[in-house]
Image (spheres, rainbow, N blue to C red):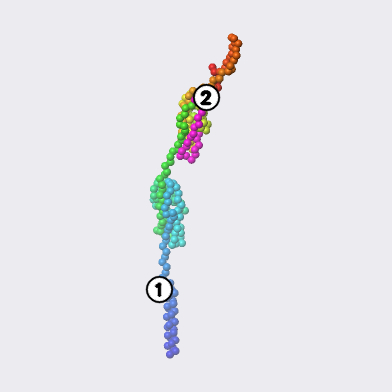
Amino acid sequence: MRQRNSLAVSVAIAAFLGLAGCTGSAGSAGTTLPAPQAVEVRISPASAAVDPAGTVTFAAQVTGTATTAVTWSVQEANGGSVDPNGIYTAPTAPGTYHVVAASNAVPASQAIAQVTVRSAPVVSPVGVTVAPSESTLDACLGVVLTATVTNAPGTGVGWSVQEAGGGTVVNGLYTAPSVPGTYHVVATSEVDGSARGTATVIVGPARVLSLAIAPGQAALAVDGAQTFAANVTTSCGTFAAQ
């Protein structure tokens, strides 16, 4: 009787140990291993707009693998270039291009960003205008001219008179010559020497402003004589009358 009981205990213990061994084994039935995580690549920004020859910096994030490095490329031929750090340089031609980041661990895992290269901005030419555009002066008189510069970062101009002997101009203050004629005052942009504005000045004869006779009065004896002098003041100065 005792022999049978001992045998039954031994069988029970062996069964328990066998069951414990099955549940503890990683490859035994009833044990579920975690599914491998897929490698995924994300790129930011996902889209960008840039001027011709401009740059955009992209960043890539890789999950599902310990290897987080990526290889950068541009999908289109002549679509610009991207360096190993994700810095994209656009081509000069406008259009839509695509920057690709591919996982080094699983090259088939990729992310794509879209880049729009804008058309080159239209640059308006530098313009210079002078006001007043036309003036009429007496000889030797002056006029103040003002230059306006457009489409340029600087508004400074250089002043000059087109004709030799056509008067002088300093900081926009033009002084006519003593000789009548038609002259042209030029303002040239300091930013773009080809941009110029011109004002026309018509200069007339000197204007007589006053006539003075000296002495102003005289007392003479009969048959006496007196010498008089006359001075004429014009727009060009005071002169002895001839």
- Return the residue nearer the eye: 35 or 48: 48
The answer to whether 131 is drawn above or below residue 179 in the figure is below
Q: Amino acid at mark 1?
A: Gly
Residue at 43% x, 40% y: name it.
124
**Residue 28's quadrant in the figure?**
bottom left
Q: Which residues are magenta?
A: 138-158
**Residue 233's quadrant in the figure?**
top right
- From the top left corner, tell me how far across and down residue 87 is, in percent: 46, 51
Residue 35 appears left or right of 236: left
Judging by the rendered image, the residue that carries numbered circle 2 is 235
Judging by the rendered image, the residue that carries numbered circle 1 is 30
Total marks placed: 2
Residue 217 appears left or right of 77: right
- Return the residue nearer the eye: 45 or 145: 145
| 211 in magenta | no
The answer to whether 226 is drawn above or below residue 34 in the figure is above
